[in-house]
């Protein structure tokens, strides 16, 4: 009997206190006269208590026993109502400790969002609306087309229509040859790519609970484990347990992959390739590979002299496979720099079948950044395995619901149809070039103005 895919989210509160985004400072020399005025106007103690606790904040920042003398900063959402209604009495600023959370790519807002998603598995909602810049670098310069948003049955997240998020890993026959396809289907186009050096226990357990897959270095495995894809080099083939159906091999040549494939008959062998602008190599490798895992650094850039971002790299790899007329034969997995739920459909639109997440999983476990996380891993605090597993399950539950939302808004009932649909995306740089450049000329950046 058909059963709709579902990820069971449960509360997994933060184990370590999250620095609040806003810092609230009350100037007591100006606040005390307000209290004296309240004392003079209050008819009884109950009215006075109610007045003190009902300072202009719907979130209860001033709801402590002494009101504004000890604001509860954790409740501040930055609406600035208190500042507007009491100028000079209250200052609301960005908390310096909050700005230290993350790095230049995993910005504090991204980290805070992942923490919230991992704590309850819900779709984050900001009632005040988006107040950030119009566009930005990387994924922030790519927008999706929601032209179908008026459809009354688009709401896949609430079950009014079924939206399939199932994808396949492996090679498919485009011409009937009498043999069945050797593929593995998973219910969500996301897999874990466990960084080497990280205890993979909770990641493996989260993959098992959600029915997804976790790529884990061979040295971090303890025998045969469910929902795990061993990651190995050619020299480690003999150490792989024969019970694994899918294996990921680190390759840098077509010959190296062919040797691994010959040594692993009947297995789905994923070629792990470091992204470095090698589009021609990817097209050659794809003629033989069951699947390709294109890996970028943790900030989503290629490892080359002139690195492209994951958006451009994925588009180039996808188009290389299309030009070679083999795009439908194999699955393309892309990873590195996936830091938000929206990055999943955006990467798929650029041509990926599946995305792999790495640092985002560590952020969900409340890791601590030590400088820039490009190749250096953030450090993890000690935590209970049950708590860590549920945090990762919650993160996937939240991202799954958001994937359903964006699929429904785009009018797509199947995630496979989203792959390579660049016509359903808009890129800020392209729009600026096409629309504004003919009128205003090429944009002059601050650096160019200084240089002149």
Image (cartoon, rainbow, N blue to C red):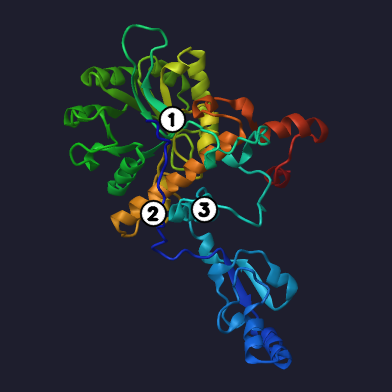
Q: Position of residue 4 (x, y in %)?
A: 43, 36
Query: Are discs 2 and 3 less than 8 Å apart at CB?
Result: no
Q: Which mark is residue 365?
A: 2
Choose mark 1 or mark 2, whichever is in front.
1
Where disc 3 sits, the SS reads helix
- Between 439 and 93, the one nearer to me in the picture: 93
Left or right: where does residue 337 sit relative to residue 202? right
User: Depth-wise, is mark 3 or mark 1 nearer the camera?
Assistant: 1
Compare marks 3 and 1 and give the one earlier in the sequence: 3
- Residue for badge 1: 166
Q: Label 2: few (<14), some or many (≥20) within 10 Å? A: many
Cα separation between marks 3 and 1: 26 Å
- At 23% from the left edge and 18% from the top edge, which residue is drawn? 265
Among the two numbered marks 2 and 3 on one chain, the one whose residue lies closer to the N terminus: 3
Total numbered circles: 3
Q: Position of residue 284 (x, y in %)?
A: 41, 16
Q: Quadrant of residue 96?
A: bottom right
- Please name the residue that numbered disc 3 is placed on: 113
Residue 107 sits above or below residue 148 on the image: below
Asked whether 186 or 423 is in front, the reply is: 186
Mark 2 to mark 3 CA distance (whole Å): 13 Å
120, above or below 224, in the image? below
Instruction: Choose top left, top right, bottom left or bottom right for residue 185.
Output: top left
> Helix, strand or loop at disc 1?
loop
Residue ID at (56%, 68%): 75
């Amino acid at each position: 009997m058909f059963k709709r895919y579902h990820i069971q989210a449960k509360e997994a509160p933060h184990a370590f206190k999250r620095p609040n985004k806003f810092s609230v400072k009350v100037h007591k020399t100006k606040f005390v006269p307000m209290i004296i005025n309240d004392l003079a106007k209050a008819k009884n103690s109950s009215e006075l208590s109610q007045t003190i606790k009902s300072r202009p904040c719907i979130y209860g920042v001033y709801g402590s026993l002494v009101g504004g003398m000890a604001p509860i900063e954790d409740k501040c959402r930055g609406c600035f109502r208190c500042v507007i209604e009491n100028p000079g009495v209250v200052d609301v600023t960005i908390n310096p400790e909050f700005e230290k959370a993350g790095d230049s790519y995993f910005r504090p807002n991204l980290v805070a969002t992942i923490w919230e998603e991992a704590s309850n598995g819900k779709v984050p909602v900001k009632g005040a609306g988006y107040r950030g810049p119009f566009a930005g670098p990387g994924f922030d310069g790519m927008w999706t087309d929601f032209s179908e948003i008026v459809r009354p049955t688009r709401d896949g997240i609430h079950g009014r229509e079924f939206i399939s998020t199932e994808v396949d890993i492996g090679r498919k026959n485009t011409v009937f040859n009498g043999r069945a396809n050797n593929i593995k289907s998973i219910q969500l186009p996301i897999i874990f790519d466990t960084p080497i050096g990280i205890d993979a226990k909770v990641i493996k357990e989260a993959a098992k609970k959600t029915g997804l897959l976790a790529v884990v270095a061979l040295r971090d495995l303890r025998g045969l484990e469910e929902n795990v894809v061993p990651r190995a080099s050619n020299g480690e083939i003999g150490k792989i347990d024969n019970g694994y159906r899918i294996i990921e091999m680190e390759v840098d040549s077509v010959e190296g992959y062919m040797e691994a494939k010959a040594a692993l008959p009947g297995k789905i062998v994923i070629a792990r390739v470091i992204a470095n602008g090698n589009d021609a190599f990817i097209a050659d490798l794809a003629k033989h590979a069951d699947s390709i895992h294109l890996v970028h650094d943790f900030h989503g850039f290629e490892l080359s002299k002139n690195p492209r971002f994951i958006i451009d790299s994925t588009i180039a790899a996808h188009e290389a496979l299309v030009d070679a007329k083999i795009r439908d034969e194999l699955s393309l997995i892309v990873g590195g720099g996936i830091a938000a739920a929206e990055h999943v459909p955006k990467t798929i639109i650029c041509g990926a079948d599946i995305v792999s997440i790495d640092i985002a999983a560590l952020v969900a476990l409340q890791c601590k950044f030590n400088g820039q996380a490009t190749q250096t891993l953030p450090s993890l605090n000690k935590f209970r395995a049950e708590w860590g597993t549920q945090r990762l399950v919650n993160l996937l539950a939240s991202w799954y619901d958001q994937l359903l939302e964006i699929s429904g808004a785009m009018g797509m009932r199947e995630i496979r149809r989203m792959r390579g649909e660049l016509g359903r995306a808009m890129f800020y740089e392209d729009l600026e070039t096409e629309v504004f450049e003919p009128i205003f000329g090429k944009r002059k950046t601050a650096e160019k103005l200084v240089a002149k």
